[in-house]
Image (tube, rainbow, N blue to C red):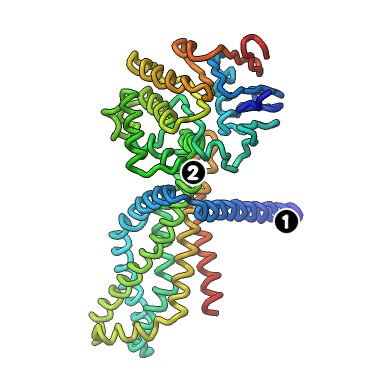
Amino acid sequence: MPERLASGLGAKVRRAFGQLGSFSWLLGRCLQAMLRLSREQRRVVLEVTRIQIRFTALDALPLTFFTALLLGGITLLQVFGQLSGFGVERHISQILAQLVIRELGPLMVGILVISRSGTAMATEMAGRKLSGELAALYASGVDPVPYLLVPRLLGGVISVFSLVIVFDTVALLGGFLVAWLRLPVSFGFFLGALGEAIGRRELTATFCKCLVFGAAIPLICTGYGLRVKHSPTEIPQAVTKASVVSLAVLLLAGAILSVLIYA
Amino acid sequence: MPEPLLALEAVTLLAPEGRVVFRDLDWTLARGARFHAMGGSGGGCTALLRLCAGIAEPHAGRVVLDGAPLEPGVPHRFLRRGHLGWVPSDGGLAVNLSLLENVALPLRFAQNLGRIEAERSALAWLEQAGLGPWANQRPSVPGGPENWVASLARAAAKASRLWLVDRPAGGLDAASIQAAERILGQAAQDPEVTILLVGGAWMSALGRELSIGEGRVYSGGEP
């Protein structure tokens, strides 16, 4: 029994490393393709990237705004409710800033991007592969890596970065609204305290998380979409795997980055 | 003896269900050759085209195109330069682009033409194919046969050196057949252009007969 357990565990570890290898290969191909783009190819890639940013960032703004406002308010309400007896009112903006900017902002935006765009990317790639569209593009001289994957990678990074800025700003404003209703704090005081709370480490963490999440989500989702082989029934399986693995990578990478930067 | 444009060297190809489509197939396609492939359903005509285009990966052996082997995951020089005119039975057009953008895309991406120039050339070919009114529509609007003709226009617009043309999925009307004959006829005027067609009787005038069956390819009666 223990041997079987160990061998099963070994197979899972091998599979995980195999997947890591295939996503690294995909990332390598994207970076290589980016460096080799001709002038006109660069224009085409930018056109597709623009469309991707519209879908991933611009169309997600209302949902991001709504989530951030609620989350900022609720977080502050909970912190305030639990710790109001300990005289933390003066540090409320620091606590909020650290929670939102360090952890919640990138994580929530990552989850929103996986659920809206990651699943869409996986479905799109799987559909295009099964219909023979990818093969036709490849045979016609349009390499799918620079034409389809590079714009999704660039669009993912730019979109996550933009959405995190929007999310953090709105969540902090939501927090301020709740604080303003409960405490005698002015907006100037709140901003001043925020300025003190946000340092180089917070900005580094946000930047690193945006870069990693923004690149990992499109790579994983398109990668799973491209794995379908024969039947449309593989598409929902690919989409489920893409979103689950993306979420796991998001949590793991977020935890590793937080430990590296703050520990 | 001049080097063939395309060579299948000891190629074995299995269908997804495990059936042998080709076994140890050696076959060459000379530059400037014109063939019209015949064969029963599932006989391997489309599979041969897919092998030649680098879309189907042989289980054994290799396919050499213009002196370099086709390898999975490695963009081939010949394909990257847009020299291959691939016309699958459904046209293989990108569903989120208009017919005009579909035809112009390889010109921009593979042949580095600017957008305006590429779209001008694409429109001229679409008009010649009788698809001018559909130019700004996505492939879902005109339908299968028109998409197939648009795919021919795409191959023509980039002055393909090797045409691999599968039979259209739906029946073509007289106007579409006429447009297809016109485009293929123009391509055939260049003696350097190599054409391999699979399809209906109206295509037979465009090349010598090639029979495919029992895992072999017979050109003019000779395997």
Instruction: Residue at 39%, 52% (x, y): give it.
Output: A46
Q: In which image quadrant can residue B108 be found?
A: top left
Rendered location of residue B184, percent (x, y): 44, 20
Q: Is residue A173 above or below residue A15?
A: below
Task: State left or right for residue B16 relative to residue A232.
Answer: right
Residue at which label 2 appears: A144
Task: State left or right for residue A250 relative to residue B66.
Answer: left
Q: The disc numbered 2 marks a residue on which chain?
A: A
Looking at the rendered structure, the secondary structure element under dot 1 is helix
Residue at which label 1 appears: A6
Instruction: Residue at 23%, 80% (x, y): give it.
Output: A181
Tell me if label 2 and label 1 are in contact, CB under 8 Å: no
Residue A232 appears anywhere in the view = no
Crowd tier of the residue under label 2, counting other residues whose Cα lies within 10 Å: few below 14, some 14–19, many 20 or above: some
Instruction: Residue at 64%, 55% (x, y): give it.
Output: A17
Camera-side residue of A166 and B135? B135
Q: In which image quadrant can residue B144 be found?
A: top left
Rendered location of residue A13, percent (x, y): 66, 56
Camera-side residue of A110 and A161? A161
Asked whether the residues under marks 2 and 1 belong to the same chain, the reply is yes
Which is in the foreground here, disc 2 or disc 1?
A: 2
| Placement of the C terminus of chain A among the 4 image quadrants | bottom right
Farthest residue, direction right: A3
Crowd tier of the residue under label 1, counting other residues whose Cα lies within 10 Å: few below 14, some 14–19, many 20 or above: few
Indicate the amino acid at tag 1. Answer: Ala
